[in-house]
Amino acid sequence: GAVVSQHPSRVICKSGTSVKIECRSLDFQATTMFWYRQFPKQSLMLMATSNEGSKATYEQGVEKDKFLINHASLTLSTLTVTSAHPEDSSFYICSASDPLAGNNEQFFGPGTRLTVL
Amino acid sequence: SQQGEEDPQALSIQEGENATMNCSYKTSINNLQWYRQNSGRGLVHLILIRSNEREKHSGRLRVTLDTSKKSSSLLITASRAADTASYFCVPSTQGGSEKLVFGKGTKLTVNP
């Protein structure tokens, strides 16, 4: 199957700093990528849909000014957590589907664990 | 998009036994997917079953779909300790690059 990578896999930062997480589709082009957040012992919560060349679509309750998404190319989407606070500590996962596959099977990255001190 | 509801929420079995997880959803679908998540990891796609299919196999996995009952099941045969994970069913209404909504999943523990 297709491969999606995320970088970094783990990041620890101080409160008030910004953190950028990259999501790459390695062997296919993804016009759409998705960003999820997962708190301990909870399910994935969709944060936003990242569209190549246009603005992201955010889910209700997700602050677009805090979670900046940029999908500048067909293989890369970035999520920047601005002015991070301890409550932003979570597991962030991206996914992408291959538009040529003809279905909406999504390929997930390995996730990024963010810890804000 | 709609969310599937997995049942049971937790399942504990011995290695070698079969594990059955169920999923229910509310409205008509284009397809339904099953994913697995090992603790602290990303998700792995297991099987996609289309609305016109009734059963699908992949290795030790068997998925059934009953659109009249709006339900699906995932059977893992001859389970292994490595099957320990959370399993999610995700119904899809449209297909394409539709956003997926995840429920709470079934947490499967396979004891050696």
Image: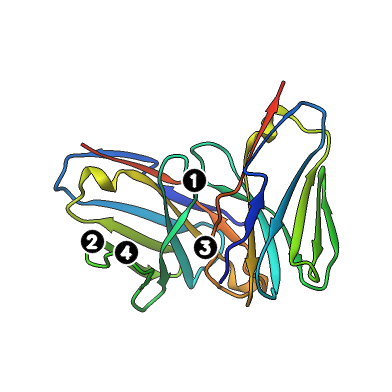
Image coloring type: rainbow
Marks 4/1: CA–CA distance:
22 Å
Q: Chain of mark 1?
A: A
Q: CA distance from mark 1 to mark 3?
A: 12 Å
Q: Circle 3 — which element? A: strand
Q: Which mark is first along the chain, 1 or 2? A: 2
**Residue A91 visible to the viewer:** yes
Q: Residue type at mark 2?
A: Lys
Q: Which mark's residue is nearer the viewer, 2 or 4? A: 4
Q: Measured from the top left, where is residue B73 in percent x and y?
A: 77, 53
Q: Disc 2 designates what residue?
A: A66
Ranked by sequence position, the earlier of labels 1 and 3 is 3
Sequence-earlier tag: 4 or 1: 4
The foreground one among A102 and B4 is B4
The disc numbered 2 marks a residue on which chain? A
Residue beneath the point at 32% across and 65% down: A61
> Does residue A19 appear left or right of residue A7 in this picture?
left
Query: Is the C-beta separation of discs 4 and 1 under 8 Å?
Result: no
Asked if the residues shown at circle 4 and circle 3 are in contact, with their CB atoms under 8 angstroms apart, the answer is: no
Q: Which residue is mark 4?
A: A62
Residue B75 lies, with reference to residue A67, above or below; the image says above
Q: Position of residue B63 (x, y in %)?
A: 80, 54
Residue under pointer 3: A96
In the picture, which quadrant includes the N terminus of chain B?
bottom right
